[in-house]
Image: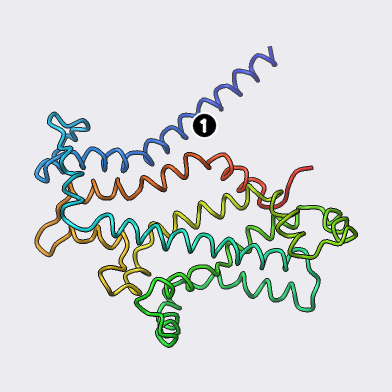
Amino acid sequence: MNLESMTLRRRASHLVIYIILAMFAIVAIFPFAWMISASLKFDTQVFNYPIEWIPANPQWGNYLKVFEKFNFLQYFKNTAVVTILVTLGTLLASILASYAFAKLNFRGRDTLFLLYIATLMIPWQTIMIPQFLVVNGLHLNNTHWGYILTQIFTPFGVFLLKQFFMGIPNEYSEAAKIDGCNHVRICFGIILPMAKPALTTLLLLTFMGTWNDYLAPLIYFKTESLRTLQIGLHYFQGENETQWALLMAGAFLSMIPVLLLYIFTQKQLIEGMASAGGIKG
């Protein structure tokens, strides 16, 4: 009897948890569902209540108008270029720094790591102007490279990979040194293949953050031909009116690359976040 009551109690607790999770899922999905629905309506229908989730007369032409109203393909290309370069640069810089902090012994290593990680507590808004002045002093303002160089050095990436690298037994590195491998071969030939979940996590988070970035590109890209999608979408918002249907259509198109990347890497993302403190075995 006690066993049956415990089983029922466990099932009831699981049911409550599932209901709560389902409610959170609905809350999370609601804005995206509304965005897709609004993108298929006229502006006058977007805020009608009750919400017409499936429009009786879908305006598929809104997606074509997005390409007609502003240079969507140019903005998409700019966004893709800076996002790919920032992601690759972040991965490379984080890998090298994390390997040094996790596998090399040098004076002041732990202190330097703590000081670097402490910069996570500094809001970007407080260093925004000094960072801009440095970029401007290097004559890199209004260039993609000026923006890229300010984004690739991230303490979060170093922290994530360093924690994972520390979980990899040093015996692998020692055996490789005996075989004559240098640190470059050890890092890229032995450590990295074992750290794929953490690398995928950093790749996805960096890609998403850069692709959706609005404020920094707005600061650094003054020329129209350099601007990214998130800035381009702002042109649907005027002083007197906002073209909500086109704005939602453009927003949906802009999120497709991130959505596809997440779909294909979600397993590695979960593994990387779960094992950030080390690896099993």
Give the vertical position of 270 relative to 113 (above or below).
Answer: above
Is 23 placed left or right of 68 in the picture? right
Q: Residue at x 32, y 72 (%)?
A: 221
Pick whichever, 176 or 233, lies toward us.
Answer: 176
Quadrant in which the N terminus appears: top right
Instruction: Estimate the x, y position of residue 49 in percent, counting from the top left.
Output: 15, 37
| Residue farthest along the top direction in this orientation | 1
Q: Secondary structure at mark 1?
A: helix
Residue 137, image quadrant: bottom left
- Quadrant of the image occupied by residue 57: top left
Task: State the image coordinates of residue 149 (x, y, percent, origin top left).
Answer: 49, 73
Spot the residue most to the right: 178
How is colour applied across the structure in the image?
Answer: rainbow
Percent x, y for residue 75? 30, 59
Q: Nearer the viewer, residue 41 or 70?
A: 70
Q: How many numbered discs?
A: 1
Q: Residue at x 43, y 73 (%)?
A: 145
Which residue is more in the foreground, 134 or 274?
A: 134
Q: Identify which amino acid the numbered label 1 is placed on.
A: Ile
Which residue corresponds to mark 1?
17
On the picture, is 275 further left or further right than 208? right
Say which residue appears at 25% left-offset and 55% top-offset. 72
Outermost residue on the bottom side: it is 137
Q: Say above or below: 135 vs 30.
A: below
For the C terminus, the quadrant is top right
Q: Left or right of 221: which side holds 89? A: right
Q: Position of residue 18 (x, y in %)?
A: 49, 29
**Residue that appears at 18% across and 33% down:** 52
Mark 1 packing: few (<14 Cα in 10 Å), some, or many (20+)?
few
Quadrant housing residue 274: top right
